[in-house]
């Protein structure tokens, strides 16, 4: 019998966490599912771990390393179900991860994407850390009260694929994930889907996210750069979105992204790159006093 939902799990050198992560998906016994695990060229024994799972619902796809977007695309190509969900290989699926969105999609045939909240586990090595919602309560309430379109996805950066379930038709019509994005390929996909299809938000946690503080700090500059490029791509390829997003809001958010990139570059010791980013921010929003002060400070620092 064909599965009702395919769960795409890209993985690269996470054998230490993959077994528990896949088991959390397989624990949902009341859903006909397949788990398509795409081993993106791992070197840590991931292929052997997958071979030893012994569950026919797990379908390994072994491929050379090409990055997370390419791995997700390979998973979509291998998937057989009419609904497709995504999962990160070091996260945990919570009870109802699949049953909840599938029931909603069945009851709302005009919706092609369900977005759910998640839980962030305390950072590793922080015994006093607290668990927090992925999307804070005030934002979750606002999202749950309205239809979700590209403007909401853009405003609140709704790119957490591990909390989403798509119809196959929406993904097929939208096209593959863009491998030129190494971090924000997920947000790019969701923006493109919600340009054409309706989405809904459910404030029900679907996943538990393991935080890695070192990784976030290391990737901060790249995230800022990709966020700028993603916004530019969106309005270049779909200029009508400026009206849906609000031109003034878009420009100011883009200026803020350049300002944050300037800060990230300065922290990384790249004063020249910081000045260039700040110049972009000031060009977009010349009246912002904070940008002028930062530019003055950087100019003075450059004379030292």
Image (tube, grey):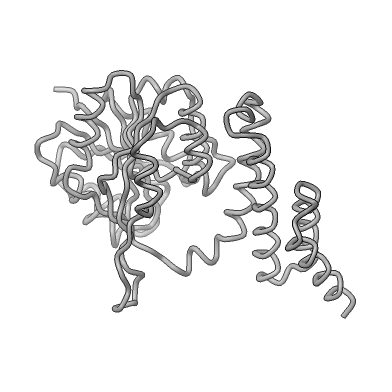
The residue under the point 90% across, 76% down is 303
Side of 302 where 227 appears, left or right = left
Of residues 115 and 125, the one nearer the viewer is 115
The answer to whether residue 45 of the structure is visible from this angle is no
Rendered view: 122 above or below 89: below
The residue under the point 37% across, 49% down is 11
Name the image quarter holding the C terminus: bottom right
Q: Residue furthest right?
A: 303
Side of 222 where 48 appears, left or right = left
The answer to whether residue 247 of the structure is visible from this angle is yes
Query: Percent x, y for residue 222?
Result: 60, 55
Query: Percent x, y for residue 192?
Result: 51, 29
Side of 181 where 266 appears, left or right = right
Of residues 94 and 64, the one nearer the viewer is 94
Query: Percent x, y for residue 204?
Result: 25, 45
The residue under the point 41% across, 26% down is 171
Of residues 3 and 127, the one nearer the viewer is 127
Query: Percent x, y for residue 105?
Result: 26, 26
Name the image quarter holding the N terminus: top left
Rendered view: 283 above or below 171: below
């Amino acid at each position: 019998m064909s599965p009702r939902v395919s769960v795409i799990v890209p993985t690269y050198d996470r054998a230490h966490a993959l077994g528990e992560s896949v088991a959390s998906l397989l624990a949902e016994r009341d859903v006909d599912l397949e788990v398509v695990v795409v081993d993106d060229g791992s070197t840590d024994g991931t292929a052997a771990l997958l071979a030893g799972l012994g569950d026919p619902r797990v379908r390994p796809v072994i491929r050379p390393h090409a990055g997370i977007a390419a791995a997700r695309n390979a998973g979509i190509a291998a998937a057989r179900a009419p609904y497709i969900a995504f999962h990160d290989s070091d996260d945990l699926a919570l009870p109802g991860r699949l049953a909840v969105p599938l029931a909603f999609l069945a009851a709302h045939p005009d919706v092609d994407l369900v977005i759910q909240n998640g839980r962030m586990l305390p950072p590793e090595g922080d015994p006093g850390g607290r668990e927090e919602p992925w999307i804070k309560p005030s934002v979750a309430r606002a999202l749950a009260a309205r239809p979700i379109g590209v403007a909401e996805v853009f405003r609140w950066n709704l790119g957490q694929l591990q909390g989403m379930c798509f119809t196959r038709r929406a993904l097929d019509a939208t096209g593959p994930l863009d491998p030129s994005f190494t971090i924000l390929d997920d947000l790019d996909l969701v923006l493109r889907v919600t340009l054409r299809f309706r989405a809904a938000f459910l404030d029900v946690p679907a996943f538990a996210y393991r935080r890695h503080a070192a990784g976030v700090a290391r990737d901060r500059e790249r995230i800022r750069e990709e966020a700028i490029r993603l916004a530019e791509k969106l309005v270049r390829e779909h200029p009508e979105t400026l009206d849906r997003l609000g031109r003034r809001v878009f420009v100011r958010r883009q200026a803020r992204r350049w300002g944050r990139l300037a800060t990230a570059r300065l922290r990384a010791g790249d004063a020249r790159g910081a000045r260039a980013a700040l110049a972009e921010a000031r060009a977009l929003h010349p009246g912002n006093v904070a940008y002028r002060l930062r530019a003055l400070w950087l100019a003075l620092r450059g004379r030292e």
